[in-house]
Image (spheres, rainbow, N blue to C red):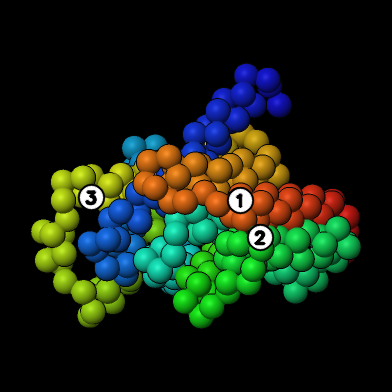
Amino acid sequence: MKTSHRYVGDSIMLATALLMGSSYPFAKDVLATMSPLLYSGSRYLIAGLFLMAMLALKRQPMGLPRRDWPAIFLLSILGVAVFQACWGLAMARSAPSLGSIVMTTTTAFSAILARLAGRRLPALGWTGIAIAFAGVVLVVNNSLTRITLAAASLDGALLWMASAFAWALYVDRCAPYNLRLGTLKVMAWTTLIGAAVLTPVSLLFDSLGEFARLSDRQLGYWLYTAIFPVGVAFLGLTAGLERLGVSRVMVYMYLIPVAGVGLSAAFFGDPLTPARVLGGLIVLLGVVLTRLALDRTARVPV
């Protein structure tokens, strides 16, 4: 790999991770007025249209083979409709910093899925999974001196973990289609279709009139979280995967909670407690160990 090519990929992934992390505090502000399902569905609808436009600008074929439509539809339901429904509901019920940390357990769920698929996971991987989930417990408890866990605090955390699992399963099942059809095409279609399913469902409970109640600031945040942390960031992921490969790209994903927690504390008043900082570091340690185990497993024939 040429050094300049790698540095371009590193720069792209650094910006991508920061963009993805920025969605957490901005989304929380919008959700003070807009309902979670309508927010998630509508912003991904804009993101899906943006990605389709990028696909057209790149002059890449936009059509899908007929045989792939059922699988792409199911991936859309899983990777956007279910994932974003849980994400929005969790964000409405908990602090952005908690969400950005708990979502890193995607790697732990990826390891579990790899084991279920027949790939042997070494002890390092299981140790990493245990450490990551122990860190999540500390983040949710949010105290170093007493037990504060309650149904109210667990509600948001469980939704975050459901969101992380849905994303891990989506990424795992997308792999063969990304190789055959292209990552950007798969992301564009699944984002658009998933949002086209989630948005009408949200309107069974919510109203488009909610947009009129958004302040100019909130409307700007809604548009920002549709285009940059989703649309532009997905383009960055595609470019990063092409230049760096999966393992190096995953390293940059560990910066997402750093961006999410930092922005939440600096600009939106989300309290940065010692328990949450320590828990976040423990989660990241577990995720790194799990990632190392997955990389080793990928190099060893099963």
* Viewer-side label of 3, 1: 1
**Crowding at mark 3 (Cα within 10 Å: few <14, some 14-19, many 20+):** many
Query: Splitting the image into 4 quarters, where does residue 287 fall?
Result: bottom right
Residue at image coords 45%, 55%: 96
Residue 109, image x and y in percent?
66, 66
State the CA–CA distance, disc 3 to disc 1. 30 Å
Circle 1: residue type: Pro
Q: Is residue 253 left or right of residue 122?
A: left
Using the image, determine if residue 7 lies above or below residue 281.
above
Badge 3 is on which residue?
A: 218
Residue at image coords 59%, 54%: 276
Badge 2 is on which residue?
A: 144
Badge 1 is on which residue?
A: 274
**Crowding at mark 2 (Cα within 10 Å: few <14, some 14-19, many 20+):** some
State the CA–CA distance, disc 3 to disc 2. 35 Å
Instruction: Please report contact status of discs 1 and 2: CB closer than 8 Å, yes or no.
Output: yes
Query: Splitting the image into 4 quarters, where does residue 6 fall?
Result: top right
Question: In terms of sequence position, does the residue under pointer 1 or pointer 2 come before the other?
Answer: 2
Residue at image coords 78%, 52%: 289
Name the secondary structure under disc 1: helix
Q: Report the front residue among 258 and 302.
A: 258
